[in-house]
């Protein structure tokens, strides 16, 4: 007699003790990009093909929303050592949700302006606005050679890593090589 009463009480109490959790939804590209707004710092690691080794330099980045849900500015200061000093790279980015692209115009002192348009998508396994993977792909050039370019950005809370990979198109290999990576930590809004 005690067992049926206990079972009935547990059946009634279980929903109260453990309310249903709504599953998190993967963000769309607009939400993922919006979650980048703020100040970040970390390191740019780049691979020198000639030396076949990695080098790293400190970087501070500020990402600024332009208020239209599509346009952002990214201002990055790289500490390139005592000979070169601080190198500033400023990028204007425009997301076109209908086309599924982001166009990036990059400005750097004493360099020609670079304009690149990437096809952009969110990995469906992404969890929420601060835990996602975004992939951007295009064709262009790297090391003065035609190449397919892929940027994979992983946001994990206050950590952000972007990996740039290239596949040279002027050889017979279908091989993605890692060119550089930026590892950042959020330091403020």
Image (spheres, rainbow, N blue to C red):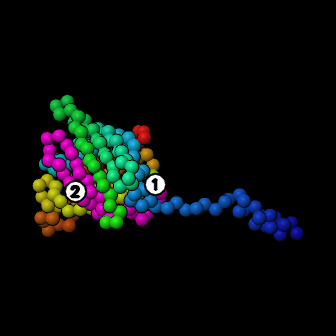
Tell me the crowding category of disc 1: few under 14, some 14 to 19, or many 20 or more residues within 10 angstroms, Cα based: many
According to the picture, the residue beneath numbered tag 2 turns out to be 116
Mark pair 1, 2: CA separation: 25 Å
Residue at position x 47%, y 59% from top? 127
Residue 117, magenta (yes or no):
yes
According to the picture, the residue beneath numbered tag 1 turns out to be 129
In the displayed structure, 35 sits above or below 110; it is: below
| Range of residues picked out in magenta | 100-128
* Relative horizontal placement of residue 99, taking residue 156 as reference (left or right): left
Say which element carries label 2.
strand
Q: Position of residue 148 (x, y in %)?
A: 21, 62
Q: Position of residue 181 (x, y in %)?
A: 28, 49
Residue at position x 35%, y 45% from top? 63
Tell me the crowding category of disc 2: few under 14, some 14 to 19, or many 20 or more residues within 10 angstroms, Cα based: few
- Nearer to the camera, 58 or 74: 74
- Nearer to the camera, 13 or 118: 118
């Amino acid at each position: 007699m005690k067992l049926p009463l206990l079972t009935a009480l547990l059946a009634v109490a279980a929903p109260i003790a453990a309310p249903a959790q709504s599953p998190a939804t993967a963000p769309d590209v607009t939400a993922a990009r919006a979650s980048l707004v703020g100040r970040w710092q970390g390191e740019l690691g780049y691979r020198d093909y000639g030396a076949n080794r990695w080098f790293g330099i400190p970087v501070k980045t500020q990402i600024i929303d332009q208020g239209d849900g599509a346009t952002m500015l990214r201002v990055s200061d790289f500490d390139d050592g005592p000979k070169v000093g601080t190198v500033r790279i400023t990028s204007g980015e425009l997301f076109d949700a209908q086309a599924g692209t982001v166009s990036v115009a990059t400005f750097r002192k004493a360099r020609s302006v670079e304009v690149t348009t990437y096809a952009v998508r969110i990995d469906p396994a992404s969890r929420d606005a601060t835990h996602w993977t975004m992939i951007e792909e295009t064709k262009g050039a790297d090391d003065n050679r035609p190449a397919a370019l892929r940027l994979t950005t992983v946001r994990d809370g206050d950590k952000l890593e972007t990996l740039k990979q290239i596949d040279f198109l002027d050889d017979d290999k279908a091989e993605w090589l890692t060119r550089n990576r930026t590892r950042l930590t959020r330091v403020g809004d």
